[in-house]
Image: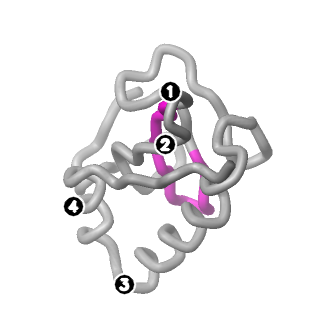
């Protein structure tokens, strides 16, 4: 059964801060990567330990999508979208320490 994807209002704001082209790349990748088997680690998808944002991360080039999974009703909740340059992660224009 496929996962239902829900994007929080904060994550929508993070997306709106990016260019339209980047938004489309990220949304397409979210649909492709998180609709099926969002709970399976892959090369671009991993489970995070001790992360205050979310337990899962999806890597899309320089972008990072942080999400949580509610297995009971097969739902993925995207909680943050950021851009990583070297070791600096920016979410909504602010630098975030993980």
- Say if 92 sits above or below 73 in the image: below
Q: CA distance from mark 3 to mark 4?
A: 13 Å
Q: State the residue at coordinates (36%, 30%).
A: 53
Q: Main secondary structure of the magenta part?
A: strand
Of pointers 3 and 2, the one earlier in the residue sequence: 3
Crowding near the residue tagged with mark 1, few <14, some 14–19, many ≥20 C-alpha atoms within 10 Å: some
Identify residue for label 2.
75
Q: Position of residue 74 (x, y in %)?
A: 55, 40
The quarter of the picture where residue 17 lies is bottom left
The quarter of the picture where residue 52 lies is top left
Q: Between 41 and 89, which is closer to the camera in this rendering?
A: 41
Identify residue for label 3.
20
Callout 3–callout 4 Cβ contact below 8 Å:
no
Q: Which mark is residue 55?
A: 1
Q: Between 7 and 51, which is closer to the camera in this rendering?
A: 7
Between disc 3 and disc 1, the foreground one is 1
């Amino acid at each position: 059964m496929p996962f239902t994807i829900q994007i929080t209002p904060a994550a929508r704001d993070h997306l709106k801060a990016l260019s339209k082209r980047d938004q489309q790349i990220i949304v397409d990748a979210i649909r492709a990567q998180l609709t099926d088997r969002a709970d399976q680690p892959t090369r671009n998808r991993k489970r995070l330990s001790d992360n205050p944002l979310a337990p899962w991360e999806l890597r899309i080039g320089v972008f990072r999508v942080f999400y949580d999974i509610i297995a009971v009703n097969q739902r993925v909740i995207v909680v943050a979208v950021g851009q990583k340059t070297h070791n600096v992660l920016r979410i909504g224009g602010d630098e975030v320490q993980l």
